[in-house]
Image: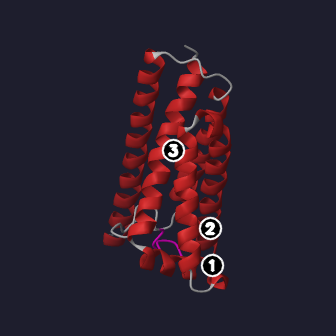
Amino acid sequence: MTLPAAIGIGIAWFLVWLFAQAAFHKINAPGYYQELVQRYVPAMGGGRMWVAMVATLEAGIALSLLVPAWRAAGLIAAAALLLAYGALMASEMLRGRAGAQCGCAGPDSSLGVSWALVLRNGVCAALALLGLAGTATTDVNWMGFMLAAFLALFAALVYLTAEQIVSNAQWMAEEA
């Protein structure tokens, strides 16, 4: 077992969860995401086609991360898309639209655009790039897969906890 391979697989599995969930949200609430596309990038028109394309891209990234031969490309694509989302959120912040719906946690979430979410996306993009270190080898035994599963679960829990902390902070700031 090589430790970098197990870590790379764990990071990939975490990103599978993240991107599959993102694609699922867009497929189940296309109207909500059409409104977000129109607000974030008004030049894109109606947004229906863009929502479908992004959902397909996210699902494709999730699938590519499951196939060892495609994992490196999937990790690079994941990092690029996370940075693009972060850049869109940063542009919203710079336009003075802090707190506007970000769409990150689905249509039922009140999570708004913030610098904390821009930072979170940067950290997730860095994790994706870190996962590239584990793509050179595929020699992983059952202990490596257990470590990968633990790492993926731990990363998902940290992600959800951070998202809840940001959401709570935003809610408390509105109450003050």
Where residue 101 sits: x, y (%)?
A: 45, 72
Q: Amino acid at mark 3?
A: Leu
Q: Is residue 98 magenta?
A: yes
CB atoms at circles 1 and 2 under 8 Å apart?
Answer: yes
**How far apart are the alpha carbons under marks 1 and 3?**
25 Å
Q: Is residue 37 magenta?
A: no
Corner quadrant of residue 72 = top right
Q: Quadrant of the N terminus?
A: top right
Q: Nearer the viewer, mark 3 or mark 2?
A: 3
Q: In the depicted view, which residue is nearer to us: 170 or 154?
A: 154
Coloured how? secondary structure
Q: In the depicted view, which residue is nearer to us: 82 or 48?
A: 48
Q: Which mark is residue 88?
A: 2
Q: Amino acid at mark 2?
A: Leu
Instruction: Determine which residue is flagged by label 3.
Output: 15
Residue 5, relative to residue 90: is it above or below? Answer: above
Q: Is residue 100 left or right of residue 82?
A: left
Q: Amino acid at mark 1?
A: Val
Q: Mark 2 falls on what kind of element?
A: helix
For image coordinates 56% across by 18% down, the residue present is: 3
Which portion, as a residue range, is magenta? 96-102
Q: Which mark is residue 41?
A: 1
Q: Mark 3 falls on what kind of element?
A: helix
